[in-house]
Image (tube, helix red, strand yellow):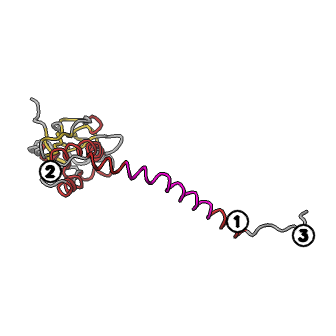
Amino acid sequence: MTNPARKRPSGTLVLLGLVGLGLAFGAGMYRIFQPRAAARTERMMAGAPTTTEGRVQAWVEFGGPIVLQRLRDARISSQQPWIVTHTVGAAGEAGDVWGIVSDELPRDLVHADGTRVVVTLPAPRFLATTVLVGDHARSVPRVAPGDPPPDASELLLRIARYALKIQIDDIREDIEGAELVIEVEPRST
């Protein structure tokens, strides 16, 4: 049984006290750490490259992993980690799948070449005979058996340009005179 004569603090006052304490703590942390962060940013800005080639090299260092991830996101599905250029087979049946394996893309597929960021992809190859599943599967071109196959390298370039459109546009805007170029290695015979 509670004593009616004993007063408890108002819930509103307790809430206001907690909010005030939280704001004061945050403001104190900001005053302590903000000068350090500003100094670190100043050092980074002072040490940043000023030439186009130097800026492109820095872009490759920081943007290369993003390019790799964007290409890996262009896969058919996690069960079929392929960037598929086309399939060969009758509609509704398993077909021969052509493309590249996104999980096998090397970390160094992006490199600087003067004022260009170059993305070098492996040549498309036969991957499997199967039915594609997943949302990306609907947009894969299918070639009937006996029909001439499309240029798989050109299809791969289109897919890569679509996947990297943001990066292609951003580097042109961010670094004057720079460009992102996508190449496909020649197919080995």
Quadrant housing residue 130: top left
Above or below, 15 against 43 in this view is below
Q: Is residue 178 left or right of residue 21?
A: left
Secondary structure category for the residue under label 3: loop
Residue 11 falls inside the magenta stretch: no
Q: Which residues are magenta?
A: 20-39
Rate crowding at label 3 as few (under 14), some (14 to 19) or many (20 or more) other CA atoms within 10 Å. few
The answer to which image quadrant residue 82 occupies is: top left
User: At 25% across and 34% down in the image, what residue appears?
Assistant: 106
Q: Amino acid at mark 1?
A: Val
Q: Which mark is residue 111?
A: none
Residue at left offset 29%, top offset 46%: 66
The answer for how far apart the CA atoms under marks 3 and 1 are is 20 Å
38 to the left or right of 149: right
Quadrant, the N terminus: bottom right
Question: Tag 1 or tag 2, which sits nearer the N-term?
Answer: 1
Residue type of the residue flagged with mark 2: Glu
Q: Residues within 10 Å of mark 1 (few under 14, many from 20)?
A: few
Q: Which residue is mark 1?
A: 14
First in sequence, mark 3 or 1: give its number.
3
Q: Name the residue rendered at 70%, 65% in the picture.
A: 14
- Mark 2 sits on what residue? 179
Residues 143 and 90: in front is 143
Q: Amino acid at mark 3?
A: Ala
